Image: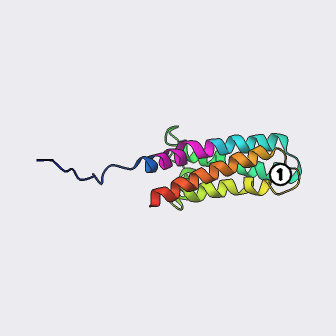
Amino acid sequence: MERCELPSFLEPSPMLLAFIIVKTFVYLEVLCLLALVRFLFARRAARWMAALALGLAVAGLGVLFAPAWDMAGGAFYAQGARGMAFGAGMGWLLVASAPLVVSAFVAGRRWVWIDVLHGLLMAGLLGLWVWSLI
């Protein structure tokens, strides 16, 4: 007699695991690098938008890694953790990306490849997010 096994509901899908890893350990780090490059080589308004994106991404990384650095007891961490939890963790990532998106359309922008990579990064994150909701 052939034995039929039911799928376990406790096993997360590989796409959900990929989404959690990208959301937690990849997105803000790559955003920091892209914003830093744009900040270093752009001019005028694009430089300031990149600086804002870089600051928001670094703040998010600070909140994300504060427990590992034993700095999770302060008021900054409590408010930052609430902000990072907004929208199941997607809110802060999209807020941090917004100035870099704006920098693609203002004066002083250089190197379109930064915008292409940022678009691919955002599309990958949003695609994994939608896939994890299905």
Identify the residue shown where x is 46% and y is 60%: 133
Q: Nearer the viewer, residue 120 or 3?
A: 3
Q: State yes or no: residue 19 in magenta.
A: yes
Q: Amino acid at mark 1?
A: Ala
Q: Residue at x 30, y 54 (%)?
A: 9
Give the camera-side residue of 88 and 77. Answer: 88
Q: Nearer the viewer, residue 85 or 10?
A: 10
Q: Quadrant of the C terminus?
A: bottom left
Tell me where residue 48 appears, x and y as whole percent.
81, 51
Percent x, y of residue 31: 67, 45
Q: Is residue 88 above or below residue 23?
A: below
Q: Is residue 65 magenta?
A: no
Q: Is residue 119 left or right of residue 15?
A: right
Q: Position of residue 123 (x, y in %)?
A: 62, 53
Which residue lies under the disc numbered 1? 46
Q: Main secondary structure of the magenta part?
A: helix
Residue drawn at (88%, 50%) of the image: 108
Residue 56 shows up from this direction = no
* Local SS, label 1: helix
Q: What stretch of residues is rendered in magenta?
A: 18-29
- Residue at screen point 68% across, 51% down: 119
In the displayed image of the protein, which residue is found farthest to the left?
Answer: 1
Q: Residue furthest front?
A: 1
Q: Residues within 10 Å of mark 1 (few under 14, many from 20)?
A: many
**x, y percentage for residue 132?**
46, 56
